Amino acid sequence: MLVTKPTGDLMDQETAAEKDELRVALGRMANGEPARFLLRSQDNKTMISGTLIKHRIESESKGCKLSALISAPEANAILVYTDGFPSNVELLMKSTSADESRQIHARTDSHGHSVTVELPYVIGKDSGIVTESITTPNCSIALSIPWGKDSYKPI
């Protein structure tokens, strides 16, 4: 990721005007790969952090959303997010990787959002595809994420 440095008068200003821009260029990135950034003032008194995702991994149905971010090399750890579900409920998420299935209990917050960590590794396998799915009376969603050896494919 590249954030261009302010030039000219912008370099010495404490604040940027509404018309001022910083340009961010993202290079080749894999599906679900986050680019994290930090903008800071020269005196380090003001800092703003953020995350950009060039190629999202997500599935949406009837207002329910399931999405994933790669959080370790070769997708050996994946953050799985749910949104649009009822608030303060327990969701039963099914995770299947290399023919092994397990259930994950995800508890939504007051906004219907939850985050869980998926570790898709299967003993005896060095790669595969993990599928996360949730079925409720209101929606049924699923998404699949490659993991392990040779799964990192920037586009």
Image (cartoon, rainbow, N blue to C red):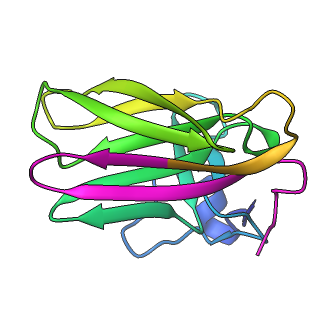
> Residue sitting at 52 percent across and 64 percent down?
56
Q: Give residue 52's quadrant in the image.
A: bottom right
| In the image: residue 110, left or right of residue 68 | left
Using the image, determine if residue 102 lies above or below residue 32: above
Q: Which residues are magenta?
A: 132-155
> Residue sitting at 44 percent across and 61 percent down?
58
Q: Where does the image place residue 109, in percent across and percent down from the top left?
A: 20, 27
Q: Does the magenta segment cover residue 104?
A: no
Q: Quadrant of the N terminus?
A: bottom right
Q: Quadrant of the C terminus?
A: bottom right
The answer to whether residue 14 is seen in the rendering is no
Q: Give residue 10's quadrant in the image.
A: bottom right
Q: Identify which residue, 155 or 17, lies in the foreground.
A: 155
Q: Give residue 45's quadrant in the image.
A: top right
Q: Where does the image place residue 100, in percent across and percent down from the top left?
A: 61, 36
The answer to whether residue 56 is seen in the rendering is yes
